[in-house]
Amino acid sequence: MLYLSTRGHAERKRFCEILLEGLAPDGGLYLPEHYPQVDDAALTRLRTTFQTQGYAALAFEVLSLYIDDIPAADLKALCAKTYTKEVYGTETIVPVRQLEDGLLVEALSNGPTLAFKDMAMQLLGNLFEYELARRGEELNIFGATSGDTGSAAEYAMRGKKGVRVFMTSPHGRMSPFQQAQMFSLMDENIHNIAIEGVFDDCQDLVKAVSNDLDFKTKYKIGTVNSINWARLLAQVVYYFAGYFQATTANSQKVSFTVPSGNFGNVCAGHVARMMGLPVDTLVAATNENDVLDEFFRTGVYRVRGSADTHETSSPSMDISKASNFERFVFDLLGRDAALTKDLFGAQISKNGQFDLSGNPHFAEAATRYGFASGKSTHANRLTTIQDVHQRFGQMIDTHTADGVKVAREHIKAGVPMIVLETALPIKFAATIVEALGQEPNRPAKFEGIEALPKRVQVMKADVAQIKAYIAQHCDHA
Ligand SMILES: *Cc1c(COP(=O)(O)O)cnc(C)c1O
């Protein structure tokens, strides 16, 4: 399997080459040259694999369709090491439960940081360690986080050989639980840097350091952001696992509703559907930051400025642009790389938006690719959390609540609707208390983490100071 860039660069690469990279050289995103097709017999084999050997075996089978430069035995071992009951709390790894008639919830949030990003990041940690050892190289991951991504990256990379993590976050702005999760890690290779500023300041620092090519090369700076193809690929697996739990025969279809921000999660659903998984509708649920909902309703993709980006109670969906969206648009346009490049390169930088409403392909987003969308607000979130608690005795987090709200608007008779549960309520306790007047349940392993010693360096938003800190903590400085 070879990978191409959505912006038409002539080079083709293999999986392990793009594993440690971010964007393609022309600024595009990597996609496989084609989507491997899973026919009825293959789907039955995967169903049996999942039912008899479990999630890790299913992951190996799906990943094998896209990865041909890691020996099968090694890839199998990496999957087996990643998706365990010890890490995810259940044998099923991503158990599906019924909420109400026709509406199911797939739990993706039982990993180490209680958010769905663990599903991909835990695998990425093992893949990085494997590939770096094979090359005899090191990598220093430098990133910015407002919560979920940074903690998932740190829990995935802690103790891994050849990898260091330098993670900036806005000082004092993450929830106490999120701060405790990250700052209580004592591993030598994990460096928490709290920046006196907001999330944008952290992102600007990452950009400034990445733009210094000499520094970037000398200190082997890399990222783990959601445009990484390996992360997206790992997420494809749980669409299969969800489907197998909700159906008994391949003639049945399901739909998914996905709480969306950067379009990484639902894009994995798109890939699964392109492979032939019987998915009826893929519903992208947004919060007040409705870039995606606007596109699917109107054909206009409009990047928001920072004044136009709202801080909401489902903060992991607070985005100004959807960084994985280019992958879907490339497919939607019949893989027209020149047009994709014009839209995401020229038009976005010049106008901050593009308009596909007049393009005949736009209608196919719904008709051919099964996409739908919806939006949920703070008030919707509170009502949904209250309703689910009162009627079913279950607590759901704010992002999942956005999903449930929007899913209910798209249910079709006879097609199970699976809402992806992207976080546990304890991560966003303040809003749960606002909705229910009580604290969310806390998994036993997180009892009292706020009181643990913290390992964090507070710093000004100063590029020179950050660079000095990174240099000082790299052995070969
Ligand atoms: C990251 C995240 C999302 C958004 O996922 P995307 O892949 O960016 O669309 C939704 N919910 C939670 C809890 C998250 O951490």
Image (spheres, rainbow, N blue to C red):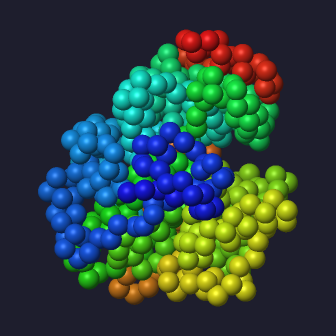
* The C terminus lies in quadrant: top right
Q: Residue furthest left?
A: 52
Image vertical order of residue 72 relative to residue 35, above or below: above
Residue 26 visible, this angle: yes
Task: Give the residue displayed 75% in from the left and 76% down from the top.
Answer: 355
Residue pictured at 77% horizontal, 41% vertical: 200
Q: Position of residue 228 (x, y in %)?
A: 52, 48
> 377 or 133: which is nearer to us?
133
Work out which residue is located at the far front of the displayed protein and give it: 10
Q: Foreground: 405 or 305? A: 305
**Residue at figure coordinates x 45%, y 63% from the top left:** 33
The image quadrant of residue 329 is: bottom right
- Dividing the image into 4 quarters, which one contains the N terminus? bottom left
Quarter occupied by residue 39: bottom left
x%, y% of residue 430? 62, 45
Relative image position of residue 91 (x, y in whole percent): 24, 48
Q: Residue at x 54, y 54 (%)?
A: 11
- Does 407 sit above or below residue 48? below
Q: How many marks?
A: 0
Determine whether, in the image, residue 91 is placed left or right of residue 230: left
Res 385 visible: no
Residue 405 image position (x, y, % from top left): 56, 70
